[in-house]
Image: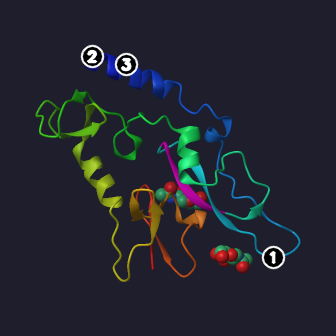
Amino acid sequence: MFILAVLIQILVAIGVNCQPGCNSELFLGNSCSHGQNKTTIMWYFDSTLSFCYPYQFLGCDEGPNSFKSQDQCLESCKPADQFSCGGNTDADGVCFSPLDQSCKKGATCVMGGTVGFCCDKIIQDQWNEEHSPKCQSGSVAQIEQWFGKTPLIGRNCSHNFCPTGSRCIQQKWTAHCCV
Ligand SMILES: *[C@@H]1O[C@H](CO)[C@@H](O)[C@H](O)[C@H]1NC(C)=O
Ligand SMILES: *[C@@H]1O[C@H](CO)[C@@H](O)[C@H](O)[C@H]1NC(C)=O
C-alpha cells in the first residue's frame, strides 16, 4: 500500500507541468508604451523550487509562464500531491511519522500526505526558517489566503514583488518583504 503510494507520487512527479508555460523562463513583460503605469503582481512557476512565486508584471507583453493568482499557478503547474524536501531536494527514503527513527542519520521525517519522506535535516531546518521570516525592524508583509494570512514569499528580490514602501530581503532560496 505504501509502496503503491510512493510509486504514484513518482509517476505524478514525472508527468508534472501539463501546461507548457510552466516550464518557460520567467518574463517580466515590458512597460506599455502609451499611458499610465500598468504594473501588477502576477505569479509564475519556478521549476527549480517547483513552486509558484509572485513577480511584478510590467503591464504589456505577458510571457507564457504567468498566472493571475498563486492558486491558479499551482493548479496549472504543480500536482497537488507532489512532494519534495526543502529547496526541492530529493528525499532519501520514506518514513511513517515525524517521530519515526527510520531515516538515516542527519535526516528528518517530513510528512507529505499519507507517507513521510526522509529529508536532510540541515537543509530542512534552513528551509523552514526561511518560510517563517522575521524582520530586524518592522513586520513581515503578508498575503491573505483562504486559510488565513501567511508571509508573502517571493523567489528573488529582482522580481520586484514587494509592496510599495517595503524592503525586500533576499535569503538563500527565497525572499520576503519588511514593512
Ligand atoms: C508602477 O506602480 C507600481 C505599483 O503601484 C510601483 O511599484 C512602480 O514603482 C511603479 N512604476 C513606475 C515606473 O512608476
Ligand atoms: C536573483 O536574481 C539575480 C538577477 O537575476 C541573480 O543574479 C541572483 O542569483 C538571484 N538570486 C537567487 C537567490 O536566486
Along the horizontal axis of the image, is 172 left or right of 124?
A: right
Whether label 2 touches label 3, CB < 8 Å: no
Question: In 3D space, how far apart are the residues under numbered discs 1 and 2 (Cα atoms)?
Answer: 58 Å
Residue at the limit of the structure toward the front, as seen here: 146
Disc 3 secondary structure class = helix
* Residue that mark 1 sits on: 36
Quadrant location of the N terminus?
top left
Question: In 3D space, how far apart are the residues under numbered discs 2 and 3 (Cα atoms)?
Answer: 10 Å
Q: Report which quarter residue 59 is drawn in.
A: bottom right
Q: Report which quarter residue 43 is drawn in.
A: bottom right
In this view of the protein, which residue sits in the foreground, 134 or 120?
A: 134
Question: In 3D space, how far apart are the residues under numbered discs 1 and 3 (Cα atoms)?
Answer: 52 Å
Disc 2 secondary structure class = loop
Task: Residue type at mark 3: give it.
Answer: Leu
Q: In the rendered view, tell whether residue 138 sits above or below residue 129.
A: below
Task: Residue type at mark 1: give it.
Answer: Gln
Question: Residue 63, percent across and down?
Answer: 73, 50
Dot 1 or dot 2, earlier in sequence: 2
Disc 1 crowd, CA 10 A, few/some/many (<14, 14-19, 20+): few
- Label placed on residue 137: none
At 39% from the left and 62% from the top, the residue drawn is 148
